Amino acid sequence: MALVPVILCGGSGSRLWPLSRDLYPKQFLTLTGTLSLLQATVKRAAAVSAENPILVSNEAHRFLVAEQVSSMGAKWSDLILEPVARNTAPAIAAAALRLQATQPDAVMLVMPSDQQIDDAGQFAFAVKAAVEAAESGRLVTFGVQPTFPATGYGYIRATERVNPSVVKALAVAQFVEKPDEQKAQGFLQTGEYLWNSGMFVFKASTFIQALERHAPAMLSAVRKAVDAGKHDMDFFRLDKVAFESSPSDSIDYAVMEKTDRASVVSLNLGWNDVGAWDAVWDISDKDANGNVSSGDVVMHNTRNSLVHASGRLVSTIGVEDIVVVETADAVMVARKDRAQDSCIAMRRFAAGSATRAGASPLPTSVVKLNSRMNSMR
């Protein structure tokens, strides 16, 4: 039975402002190493499956996706374009319907394009366990072994205490919203709770059956969008009118929290959803003072901080636990534990951007791609 990776390339990455922008969100950024988050995901998929991935992208980013995947010598089997954002469930539904038409027995490995996983071998081992469960008709998600009482993640409670040394699919007892610190501490102590990773494994046919039962209006709209969709060069465009009519919902709310077929496989490895600048600091190599820097940066008496300079010299003196991100048209300075609030600054910036002069913060390659997009509309 074929295992087909499905990589979700949408998302705005607003908490990584000002480097992440609407036209260049975080999945296209190279935050560590030499690969962007998207490219690292494609490489991770290739390590567990010989099948070319299905990519689902906002149509505004189609050339970025194609360029980044092609530049690493990889190929895709389908590049589906969403005319509007409708969250993860409709995006996965479109991929499932497209896949079922050509490989009706295929198993899907659904992966966001903006996460980091350190241990590729352990991930492959977990995928194997998930595929075995999926082949028997289960809808499988991955839960990450928590290492601290995180309040920024949703949680999954298994029906039994998780053994970190045993990789197997357990039945899901409950999906839990992001908790406060006291609840998160309790979750950590029980050993039954895992962080919700947002990755899934199931047969395309099983997911479509689950949509028929739990989200029939969504399935009907997405099916119409696929049936009326059109090929455009290397892309497949979903019909806009039909796709817009679909309810906007996550796979968790639309299916996973309602089904009685949900299973979870625990991941005991380095995982990060790279949600904000404090997460970038966490996954990056640090100097002797715990600092992470890129670009033209001078640090003096600075500790446990992240400083990114895109074009100008940035100097810090006598500070600690801060984030500084400089681009051509914006500079953000934040306490590291408040870095997730950068989306607030982004909204204020966007509101005034129509009247704000300044050089483009986007890489030259992106500016050229945008020009190419406009000429082809």
Image: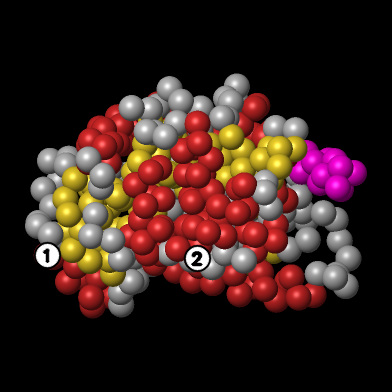
For image coordinates 13% across by 65% down, the residue present is 189
* Residue closer to the observer: 168 or 13: 168
Check residue 332 in the rendering and tell me which mark sits there, or answer none: none
- Indicate the position of residue 288 as horizontal and vertical percent values: 41, 45
What secondary structure prevails in the magenta region? helix
Q: Which residues are magenta?
A: 365-377
Query: Is residue 375 highlighted in magenta?
Result: yes
* Residue closer to the observer: 184 or 306: 184
Does residue 211 show up? Answer: yes
Left or right, 266 with reference to 27: left
Residue located beneath label 2 in the image:
217
For image coordinates 23% across by 77% down, the residue present is 182
Mark 2 nearby-residue class (10 Å; few <14, some 14–19, many ≥20): some
Q: CA distance from mark 2 to mark 1?
A: 38 Å
- Indicate the position of residue 56 as horizontal and vertical percent values: 57, 45
For image coordinates 66% across by 40% down, the residue present is 236
What's the amino acid at mark 1?
Thr
- SS type, badge 2: helix
**Image: 231 above or below 266:** above
For image coordinates 44% across by 69% down, the residue present is 337
Check residue 190 in the rendering and tell me which mark sits there, or answer none: 1
Query: Is residue 266 highlighted in magenta?
Result: no
The quarter of the displayed image where residue 137 is located: top left
What's the amino acid at mark 2?
Ala
